[in-house]
Amino acid sequence: MSFTAPIRDMQFVLNELAGLQEVAQLPGCEEVSSDLVSAILEEGGKFASGVLAPINHSGDQEGAHWNNGVVTTPSGWKEAYKGFTDGGWSSISCRQEFGGQALPVVIATAINEMFKSANMAFCLCPMLTQGAIEALELCGSHELKERFLPRMISGEWTGTMNLTEPQAGSDLSAVRSRAVPQADGSYHVFGQKIFITYGEHDLTENIVHLVLARLPDAPEGVKGISLFVVPKFLVNKDGSLGARNDVQCVSIEHKLGIHASPTCVLAFGDKGGATGYLVGEANRGLEYMFIMMNLARFNVGLEGLSISERAYQKAASYARDRIQGFEAGVRGGPRVPIIAHSDIRRMLMLMRSNTEAMRALVLVVAAGIDKAQRSSDPEQRARNQAFVDLMIPVVKGWCTETGIEVASLGIQVHGGMGFIEETGAAQYLRDARIAAIYEGTTGIQANDLIGRKIAREGGATVKAVVGMMRKLALELETESDADLKRIGAALARAVAAMERCVDYIVANYAKDIKAVSVGAVPFLKLIGIVVGGWQLARGASIAQRKLAQGDSEAAFYKAKIVTARFFADHMMSQAEGLAQIVTEGAAGALALDQEAF
Amino acid sequence: MKILVPIKRVIDYNVKVRVKADGSGVDLANVKMSMNPFDEISVEEAVRLREAGIATETVAVSCGTTASQETLRTAMAIGIDRSILVETDVELQPLAVAKLLKAVVEKEQPTLVILGKQAIDDDSNQVGQILAALLGWPQATFASKVHIEGGNVTVMREVDGGLETVELKLPAIVTTDLRLNEPRYATLPNIMKAKKKPLETLKPEALGVDPAPRLKTLKVVEPPKRAGGVKVADVQELVAKLKNEAKVL
Ligand SMILES: Cc1cc2nc3c(=O)[nH]c(=O)nc-3n(C[C@H](O)[C@H](O)[C@H](O)COP(=O)(O)OP(=O)(O)OC[C@H]3O[C@@H](n4cnc5c(N)ncnc54)[C@H](O)[C@@H]3O)c2cc1C
């Protein structure tokens, strides 16, 4: 089950669509160049194919194990983790102050894409660590940062995010874990957390838990939750490890997918209180979480893209090898590989075009994050931040849902062999399934999109994006090339459908939030398809220019145009139907009484 | 002690190679290229000798187009100190490469040259040997173990009958075999550092070498497709087939 990092497409998107040159102009990005990025992608690709990919399937089959509070990861995990940290991959986009490489998010994202393609369950550990690092960077005291960050950035210790409790999942305001102040300024934390990814494991000697809990005098609801650092082993002043803290892994879950990633139930304070330290100010924990959640959601969205790429590679390779049936319309010919069949081609093109659309969107948003964080121009920062804020629920919601569909198509291409675990295609679907659930379900993303990101600002940012897309559609419609013309026309129709929905949402959100919310997920899907198609259309237009200049990579650029055209015909055409659901679909959804179900 | 490591940019070993429609060669358009895998082993060996304090400087050299710079950067990301590109668009054959390398050796004066035993594109398995002859240096090919001590290098070689150990006086030529070591992955910090390491570009003329090819390629064809296998009923039939059809007994 080999995997080859899609470096050529990444380079195309980075250079032509995401504006790597612009990113290289940002303060602190002076070292970034196309050459350096190629070298990083090349070496990252080797690590992904050579180290992470070969243990993906075995890790799934073997799974993580729990025995009396001790969790062991599957064979090969420790060695791969050591290779990962020795290679410096854990610190790629972390700040230099505590030992990071401070590379732009757009580069880290390309690397993360290939690592997650190679082995999603493995990558959850660094992903959660990254989340914990960001929370500490963002709001930890200098003392906390110095004590924990260097060893988290180097990967010597990992981090976790302890949000969820049995009664508090999507609704974190229901968190009940308690933190009691101690005389020395620390806290004793009590409570049970569930579903904690890599909450316990054997990869490192220490684990740094970030935990949401309530102080004794905290107000009810969202405004009463604080954030604490609770290390598995206490850390002495000189940096050495001290006593084992009062946090235990009570059990791990048996799951549909990501078997190699331990999903832990953690008990805090069963033996008198787990020592914790307050991060930032009291009662602002959720607020901090939400700032850092942007990047976490983005990185989960990336999982949808990664799985799609992996599933596509596998399906394309099987379709070339599997001989079955005769070519349609050909008499007396030989039996052919299934890739000759129209329906297989359609499925492969669906997989491919959705994957490329997601990659383009994800990297464009990643470059937006870099500009929002690093630009010296406040106006550019604000504009990019608004774009990123709008797109985060789209990347998270659309890419993860699409990842599931693409992985499912991957099985279909394999026929019966796809249903057999040994083949490996099934694992991609099982693994992909969680991405649409954790870090906020698709429903939660869609609510965020139509409420906070659109209705609250009267649709200002989304209208600006609509304007950009419409401009491109008009340009393409005037092209002489038939494919570009058609892509332009499809984009124009899809954008019009999207705008109708935006107007409907803005006009009705306050009046009838329940009705508008019925269309939230369909709208999320619609906007994903349209902005993904927009990026493919941009790519097609650039490819056309390269071809006109007689570029040596004609086959690559022709394929970019064909892929965009396919996406226009098979995906963007769905926008109008989805718009109908958004604007007219509420009645039937809400009419029956709850008792009728 | 200085080590010179000649490396070649070749079609990536994962790529399914296709012959051009006109039979003039292999299709290289938009094909992924990488460092020759045997050269990765020589780079690794040189870097290990440097890390062990036995070598004081490691220099990679590649002969080929400007694109080979990328391959040299990869070598420097693994730990090679600096690089030389002998830049030419001419099709290079083993003799020309060996002559260019000889000129580089005379300029750089290394104590040891470590090369891959062969490149996976043309599988010639000649450059190390020709270079040794041109320089009049001792050679140990197909190394699976290299040990340097007191002006000598002891090399365990993979030969048809098993393993052979030879001792050579330095300066010498060593070519690497697969079992010599397992090349490491470049680390991110080292990839960044490699960008700043020196990379010098030389032209064949400046080295006084004419790299023009001496051999002419008439035609390149795909190897014949493997014929389907057959099941034999018993050992007798197998022996008969090996004798009469395959004619190997
Ligand atoms: C494998 C795995 C790993 C995880 N890792 C972590 C981790 O490391 N740290 C951590 O803290 N948590 C983690 N989680 C928890 C995860 O984030 C939650 O499961 C997720 O947020 C959903 O919460 P829930 O399970 O309580 O579902 P619920 O909130 O009960 O949701 C059930 C359904 O109701 C819908 N729903 C709920 N509220 C609304 C609403 N307001 N509007 C519309 N629809 C709504 C949801 O979309 C969903 O379809 C993990 C979960 C799993 C399964």
Image (cartoon, coloured by chain):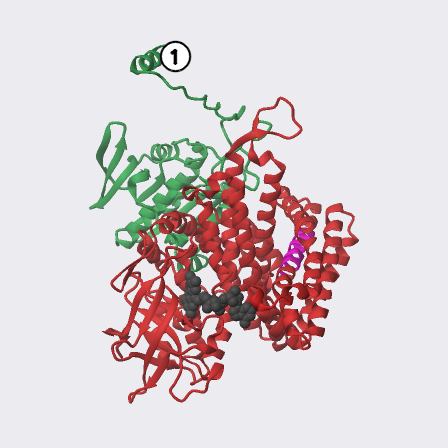
Chain colours: A red, B green
**Would you say residue A41 is visible in this rendering?**
yes
Which residue is painted at 61% across and 77% down in the image?
A378
Please state the extent of the stretch shown in magenta in the rendering.
A528-543
**Residue A28 in view (yes/no):** no
Relative horizontal placement of residue A503, taking residue A254 as reference (left or right): right
Q: How many other residues sit within 10 Å of disc 1, few (<14), some (14-19) or many (≥20)? A: few
Coordinates of residue B40 in the picture (x, y in percent): 38, 45
Which residue is tagged 1? B245
* A236 w.r.t. A67: above or below: below
- Mark 1 close to ligand 1, CB under 8 Å: no
Residue plotted at (49% across, 60% down): A435
Q: Is residue B136 left or right of residue B9?
A: left
Residue A75: image x %, image y %? Answer: 31, 51
Query: Is residue A541 highlighted in magenta?
Result: yes
| Nearer to the camera, B29 or A296 | A296
**In the rendered image, which quarter contains the C terminus of chain A?**
bottom right
Q: Nearer the viewer, residue A38 or B97?
A: A38
Q: In the picture provided, is A257 more to the left or to the right than A250?
A: right
Q: Position of residue A552 (x, y in %)?
A: 63, 43
Q: Hey, which residue is sitting farthest left in the picture?
A: B150
In this view, the residue in front, A340 or B51, is A340
Looking at the picture, which amino acid does disc 1 mark? Answer: Glu
Identify the residue shown where x is 42% and y is 55%: A256
Q: Quadrant of residue B242?
A: top left
Of A127 and A65, the residue lying toward us: A65
